[in-house]
Amino acid sequence: MVNINSSRYKMPPVKNWKIGDAFALQISSNEHEKYDGRFLIFIFDGYNSMDKSKTLPIFRIKITQKNAIPITSEDIEKLPYVISLVTLLLV
């Protein structure tokens, strides 16, 4: 099982997000050692209204190759994307 260590990294309030804002969550896993200590980088990409009552934030998600958060936006752009079922449904 892969656990996300969110205690050190807090998601900013929805009302303050701007396109391109990013935050990171660290992965903690004993079962999947290749992911242990790496980071998921969430990059805000806008909002999607699924219905009239709910607006949801949309993020592009990347994963670091090492156990460190990249410093520059160029370094972040080089990271591979995380592909999920939600990603496939939105495409």
Image: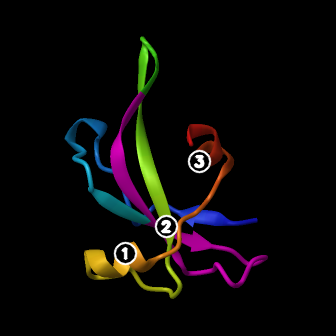
Of 28 and 77, the residue lying toward us: 77
Q: Residues within 10 Å of mark 1 (few under 14, many from 20)?
A: some
Q: Residue furthest top?
A: 52
Determine whether label 2 and label 1 are within 8 Å by CB: yes
State how far apart marks 2 and 1 are (Cα): 8 Å
Q: Secondary structure at mark 2?
A: strand
In the rendered image, the quadrant that contains the C terminus is: top right
The mark that comes first in sequence, 2 or 1, is: 2
In the displayed structure, would residue 4 be above or below residue 14?
below
In the rendered image, the quadrant that contains the N terminus is: bottom right
Q: Residues within 10 Å of mark 3 (few under 14, many from 20)?
A: few
Marking on residue 62: 2
The reply, left or right, for residue 72 in relation to residue 33 is: left
Q: Position of residue 87 (x, y in %)?
A: 59, 48
The mark that comes first in sequence, 3 or 2, is: 2
Name which residue type carries label 3. Answer: Thr
Q: Which residues are magenta?
A: 25-48
The reply, left or right, for residue 91 in relation to residue 71 is: right
Q: Which of the 4 quarters of the picture holds residue 73?
A: bottom left
Marking on residue 51: none
Name which residue type carries label 1. Answer: Ile
Q: Is residue 12 magenta?
A: no
Q: Position of residue 34 (x, y in %)?
A: 68, 84
Q: Is residue 47 magenta?
A: yes
The reply, left or right, for residue 22 in relation to residue 79 is: left
Can you identify the residue that label 3 sits on?
Answer: 87
Residue at x-position 62% and y-position 58%: 83
Q: Secondary structure at mark 3?
A: helix
State how far apart marks 3 and 2 are (Cα): 12 Å
Q: Position of residue 18 (x, y in %)?
A: 22, 47
Marking on residue 76: 1
